[in-house]
Amino acid sequence: MPYEADFFCDYKGLKKATRARLITMLKEYWWLFLLIYIAMPGKLIISGIMKNNASDIFAGASAPIFLIVVYAFVIDFSVRRQVKTNKALGNLNVHYTFNEEDFEWTSPKVSARSNYSAIYRIVEDKNFFFLKPSARQMMIVPKENCSSELIAFLENKKTEINCNKKKML
């Protein structure tokens, strides 16, 4: 029995999906997050306290806030650039059909069918499934447009695919 879902690919949807993917990456690589947001600023603060240097204390305290603002700006800029340079991406409805052996995605401009063996990894968060054929590409499937059967199906495929293949960003 095929399962179906849609993703309306516009600026707002892409921004939400990009932000969700970044958060899942931070959860997967928590040690990097810990290093960047706690260890390095903590070292600056402790160094500033020991040397009685207010600028080091300020830099250490403000660095995490600055980085969060920069990430938000980079996400916004990146998604705007993607939508602006790739006119096919803006206001595009992508329809997914998932079968037992393969899946299909169609849009007004493209239609393709692929086996699950072409998917390197499936990443899941509370709102999306990200089907990744490579490290830099992903197909976005919003859970809000999925039936409970499709969610269970993709969770099973995620377990099957991720167990057979090595971890990748």
Image (spheres, grey):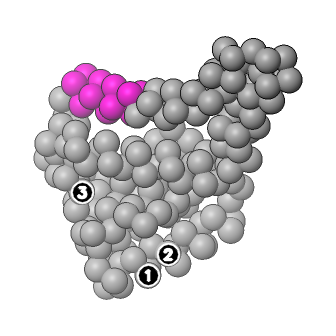
Camera-side residue of 92 and 13? 13
Q: Position of residue 73 (x, y in %)?
A: 38, 28
**The residue under label 3 is which amino acid type?**
Phe
Considering only order in the chain, which callout, 3 or 2, is on the residue closer to the N terminus?
3
The residue labelled by disc 3 is: 7
Considering only order in the chain, which callout, 3 or 1, is on the residue closer to the N terminus?
3
* Residue 42 drawn above or below residue 1: above
Looking at the rendered structure, the secondary structure element under dot 1 is helix
**The residue under label 2 is which amino acid type?**
Glu
Q: CA distance from mark 2 to mark 3?
A: 18 Å
- The residue range painted magenta reads 73-85
CB of mark 2 within 8 Å of CB of mark 1? Answer: yes
**The residue under label 1 is which amino acid type?**
Ala
The residue labelled by disc 1 is: 152
What's the mark number on residue 38? none
Residue most extreme to the right: 50
Question: Is 19 placed left or right of 147 in the picture?
Answer: right
Disc 2: CA contacts within 10 A as few (<14), some (14-19) or many (>=20): some
Question: Is 64 placed left or right of 2 in the picture?
Answer: right
The residue labelled by disc 2 is: 155
* Residue 7 drawn above or below residue 91: below
At a point 34% along the width and 25% down the height, the residue shown is 77
Camera-side residue of 115 and 126? 126
